[in-house]
Image (cartoon, grey):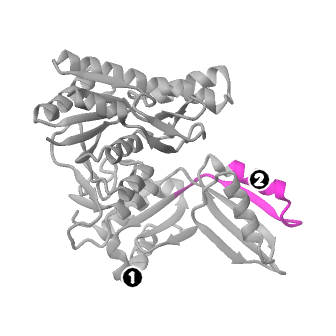
């Protein structure tokens, strides 16, 4: 007998028909002789609807109260799914995050899991119940509800799989696995049979919306093998693990991310430590900085440009203005940009990868504003309205027969 953790996203349980479909997937797994723990997100657009309700009352509500509100979405999902499983004649119990033992820190809206007390989960599994757990949420030391941020249900599922030493963690979505690009935008995109944790982490971080990046980090840390597959089409998906079979693939995927803002600081005094002062200040406010470009200006000055999320762009500008870094310094922020990236472990042993990407963009007359590289990824910042065309051009250059 195996222990299987299955996670279903909001689109998989969006309405009654899809809830019943999920119930059949879960019970088929149970009938095969497995213990099953199911993690569920809020139905469809429920989270967005709840946010809209909050905005009708208060444009800037306390994050604690937002967590109280948003946790309700998953409570609905687990109860209706449990009812569906019960209707099919199987033993089931639903648990909220805190009932399942999720203890988090107190960063409301973006809490981190500290530990999971698995006593209740293990007790229900021992009774041969199918356990349906609310993803995305937990409880802090003040007994307040907390949420894990967007995509947190993926992290919840991997955390349960790691804590219970599950045999498999399946992430069900509305696509059939991990593709070389978004198949809804690039018809020639190819589904991957398997991918490494590192490659998947880069793809998730750079805009691929199949898996949450924190869940991949956790899966790698605790060696949880993941399978990404469709809840609508019962075929094998993509396996995410430490090592994969070698393939003749230079890159594994092309992604775009439109949640990007570029902050520019023009005319900084060219003094030692200025970059440290700027980025340490941003770090204190939990602002993650991605692509960084520094250039030499005139008359003993330099320019510094970096990218952050769109939400953090205006916040970063205000922080820099408060610092009064240098007299005459100009600070600006633009949001009509996007980040297009290629990812693949094969890149590090293939010279010319960057030039091939840049050539594909040049052929489409797409201007590159910033560049960032690592051993397994290359990212460029370009105009937002050129992002889709850029992804298509780069995908065709590297994977013409995908």
Quarter occupied by residue 247: bottom left
Helix, strand or loop at label 2? It is helix
* Residue at the spot of label 1: 352
Residue 132 lies left or right of residue 72; in this view the side is left
* Residue at the spot of label 2: 319
Q: Residue furthest right?
A: 327
Image quadrant holding the C terminus, namely bottom left
Q: Do we see residue 388 in this rendering?
A: no
Q: Residue at (33%, 32%) from the top-left corner? A: 121
Residue 345 or residue 340, whichever sits in front? 345
Total labels drawn: 2
In the rendered image, residue 70, in percent from the top left (x then y), is placed at 51, 27
Eyeballing the image, is 375 above or below 231? below
Q: Residue at (20%, 15%) from the top-left corner? A: 87
CA neighbours of label 1 inside 10 A, class few (<14), some (14 to 19), many (20+)? few
Q: Do we see residue 47 in this rendering?
A: yes
Q: CA separation, marks 2 and 1?
A: 39 Å
Eyeballing the image, is 349 above or below 308? below
Residue 286 lies left or right of residue 239; in this view the side is right
Residue 154 or residue 380, whichever sits in front? 154
Whether 336 is among the magenta residues is: yes
Range drawn in magenta: 314-338
CA neighbours of label 2 inside 10 A, class few (<14), some (14 to 19), many (20+)? some
Q: Residue at (59%, 51%) from the top-left corner? A: 309
In the rendered image, residue 334, in percent from the top left (x then y), is placed at 65, 54
Helix, strand or loop at label 1? It is loop
Whether 324 is among the magenta residues is: yes
């Amino acid at each position: 007998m195996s222990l299987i953790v299955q996670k279903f996203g909001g689109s998989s349980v969006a309405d009654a028909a899809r809830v019943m479909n999920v119930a059949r997937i879960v019970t088929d797994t149970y009938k095969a002789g497995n213990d099953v723990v199911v993690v569920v997100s809020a139905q469809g657009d429920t989270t967005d609807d709840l946010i809209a309700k909050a905005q009708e009352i208060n444009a800037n509500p306390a994050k604690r109260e937002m967590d109280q509100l948003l946790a309700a979405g998953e409570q609905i999902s687990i109860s209706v799914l449990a009812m569906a499983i019960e209707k099919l004649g199987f033993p089931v119990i639903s648990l909220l995050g805190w009932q399942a033992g999720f203890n988090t820190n107190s960063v409301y809206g973006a809490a981190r899991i500290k530990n999971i007390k698995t006593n209740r989960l293990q007790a229900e599994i021992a009774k041969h119940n199918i356990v349906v757990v609310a993803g995305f949420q937990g409880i802090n030391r003040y007994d307040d509800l907390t949420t894990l941020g967007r995509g947190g249900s993926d992290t919840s599922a991997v955390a349960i799989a790691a804590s219970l030493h599950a045999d498999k963690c399946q992430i069900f979505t509305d696509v059939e696995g991990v593709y070389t690009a978004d198949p809804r935008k690039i018809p020639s995109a190819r589904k991957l049979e398997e991918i490494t944790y590192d490659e998947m982490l880069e793809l998730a971080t750079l805009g691929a919306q199949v898996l949450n990046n924190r869940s991949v980090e956790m899966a790698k840390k605790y060696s949880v093998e993941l399978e990404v597959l469709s809840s609508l089409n019962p075929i094998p998906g993509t396996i995410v693990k430490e090592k994969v079979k070698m393939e003749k693939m230079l890159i594994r995927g092309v992604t775009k991310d439109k949640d990007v803002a570029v902050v520019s600081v023009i005319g900084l005094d060219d003094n030692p430590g200025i970059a440290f002062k700027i980025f340490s200040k941003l770090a204190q406010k939990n602002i993650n900085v991605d692509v960084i470009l520094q250039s030499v200006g005139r008359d003993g000055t330099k320019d510094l440009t970096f990218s952050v999320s769109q939400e953090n762009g205006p916040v970063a500008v205000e922080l820099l203005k408060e610092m009064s870094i240098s007299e005459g310094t100009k600070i600006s922020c633009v949001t009509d940009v996007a980040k297009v990236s290629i990812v693949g472990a094969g890149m590090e042993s293939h010279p010319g990868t960057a030039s091939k990407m840049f050539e594909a963009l040049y052929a489409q007359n797409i201007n590159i504003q910033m560049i960032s590289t690592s051993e397994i990824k290359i990212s460029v910042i370009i105009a937002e309205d050129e992002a889709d065309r850029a992804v298509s051009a780069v995908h065709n250059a590297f994977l013409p027969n995908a």
